[in-house]
Amino acid sequence: MTAATDERDVPDVPEDLLDADGARIESTSSLGVFATLRRGIEISPEIARGIWVTLGLASLAAAGRVVVPLAVQQTIDVGILADDGPDAGRVALLASLAAGALVLAGLCAALVNVRLFRSAEAGLATLRVKAFRHVHDLSTLTQNTERRGALVSRVTNDVDTVSLFVQWGGIMLLVSALQIVVATGLMVVYSPVLTAVVWVAFVPMFLVIRYGQKYVNRAYTLVRERVGAMLGAISEAVVGAETVRAYGVSERTGRRIGGAVEDTRSAQARSQVLVAATFSSGVLISNLVLSIVVVVGTLLGVGGGLTAGQLVAFLFLVQLFTGPVQMATEILNELQNAVAGWRRVIAVIETPVQVAEKPGATTQERGPARVTLRDVRFSYPNGPEVLHGVTLDLPPRTKVAVVGQTGSGKTTIAKLVTRLMDPTSGAVELDGVDLRDLTFASLRERVVLVPQEGFLFDGTVLANAAYGLRGGAAGPTTGPVAEPVEITPETRAAVEQAFVELGLSDWVADLPDGLDTEVGQRGEALSAGERQLVAIARAYLAQPDLLVLDEATSAVDPATEVRIARALDSLTAGRSTITIAHRLSTAEASDLVVVVDEGHVAEVGPHDELAAADGIYARMHASWISQTR
């Protein structure tokens, strides 16, 4: 019912005015890698739930992988090369014990996978919900600092990169790290000298990887930004497809999207080149290390420092060591991709909420609504003041029309009265209580905004109108996200009665399937006027104490305007109404006219009184009369 979900119902504010502290959604968080991981786990604690049990199982799984080298060493030295000749029974026993240990390690690894998958999915579901909820908590002004497609990308695509790492890379990194530790410990037992050779050979690679990860991090951060920009451009072109075709700008739009796609491809290619270089260096060094161990180990064996079984076992351990090292380079690259996505989601969650519910906020009883503005001033971030000390007292059950030139500040007043924005200074009061002291549930129950273009959800006319019902079968509608409406016989009866009382039953009867007619995405199966009729019915069902109309009849044809005018008579009867009037016919039918001029309230009074005076409204009305003749 409010315009919080409709990107079109936002004042046109220059881009440079939106660039202010706390008003813009940052492209990414500035946290480091480990700080990002810590913050991510703070936001989604389910990811780390039961981690010590998982670590214990992972340790058993890693320990199970060294069973093969141990079994090979014992089989060669004690079974095959025994002093009394090959001992088949001992070989069979060792093989059986090794097989049992491997089965147990496999079960542990499977349990690790299951636990990590469950905890990861639970944590990432929390991350998605928190990010999505926070987006809805942000003011429309803040939301519009980023394209809708790019914003949706953070809650979907960027979280998916985190999901991929946590479910796959996290498991592999955990097991690989433990495997390196266990393999190193056993290698030291067999030959401290060869262990030192292995580590000395790999230390330079670790340093190179650590240095290279900075560049990989930057590359993946750029990839996430480019993907968001590409999705934003594509979604904008899809939503505006009709305008693109109507103005014949398909080629220009195609070039723009093509440029966004090319930027994404270029960023992806650069990141993958860095990844390939890092991974290839790991493979090269691993092969060199294996060759060095064979040579040095053979020399040690000839000198009596190693038995044949120990040398073969050590070679197996080197493979267990180098495999995770090679894998770790790829996992670390995936980590950088995940961190880049995590940072973008965190940046959304940490964007300050400018219009927030105050702790200890109160509720109000329903009843006639009196609206008071006390010395209200407002300025957009980094911009000049657009309202200058506005003071108004609007009596209850009064039809008020707010008129003025484009850019005078009248729409800003509507946003402040519905608390889609808060004043820079001063107060907006409802029955003597500052709106900032009311709970959102209480405010949304009493105050309803009908924007210029009614936003409809994908569904039927019935379901969209029923969103206005308070509680009951339709469910609560005071939260930030519209919930699916349960259509019951009572719900249908209430909606049907609303359309009858609004004088719209004949229009409903002309629809293909009546109330069950599908409206399509954003209501595009209906005309602009028909969408507005549904929005009016939705507001009627909400039965607000205060109705704020942003000239709800401005986008309809004459026949529909007559229908809406009749319906509004029923909707506004006995109810406080503030209409942002773009047509002075609306002002003529109002009880009180408020004239806004360059951010000041210039005149207040009944239409007849202001029209007879020599003032701004009189000149506006005379000009309008001359144009309509």
Image: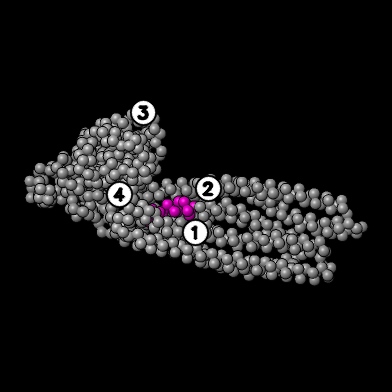
Q: State how far apart marks 2 and 1 are (Cα).
A: 17 Å
Residue 400: give x, y in percent of width and height.
19, 42
Q: Amino acid at mark 3?
A: Glu
Residue 605's image quarter? top left
Magenta: main secondary structure equals helix
Label 2 crowd (10 A; few <14 / some 14-19 / many >=20): many
Q: Amino acid at mark 1?
A: Ala
Against 322, is 500 above or below? Answer: above
Which mark sits nearer the N-terminus, 4 or 2? 4
Residue receiving disc 4: 9
Residue at image position (36%, 28%) is 490
Residue 441: give x, y in percent of width and height.
35, 39
Residue at image position (70%, 49%) is 105
Label 4 crowd (10 A; few <14 / some 14-19 / many >=20): some
Closer mark to the observer between disc 4 and disc 3:
3
Q: State how far apart marks 4 and 3 are (Cα).
A: 32 Å
Q: Is residue 328 left or right of residue 402?
A: right
Against 622, is 187 above or below? Answer: below
Residue receiving disc 2: 123
Residue 221: give x, y in percent of width and height.
48, 61
Say if mark 1 contacts mark 3, CB within 8 Å: no
Residue receiving disc 3: 490
Q: State how far apart marks 1 and 3 are (Cα).
A: 49 Å
Region of the chain picked out in magenta, as a range: 146-159
- Residue placed most toward the observer, 354 or 253: 253
Q: Tell me the element at label 3.
A: helix
Which mark sits nearer the N-terminus, 4 or 3? 4
Which mark sits nearer the N-terminus, 2 or 3? 2
Label at residue 340: 1
Q: Amino acid at mark 2?
A: Gly
Residue 597: give x, y in percent of width and height.
17, 53
- Residue placed most toward the observer, 485 or 46: 485
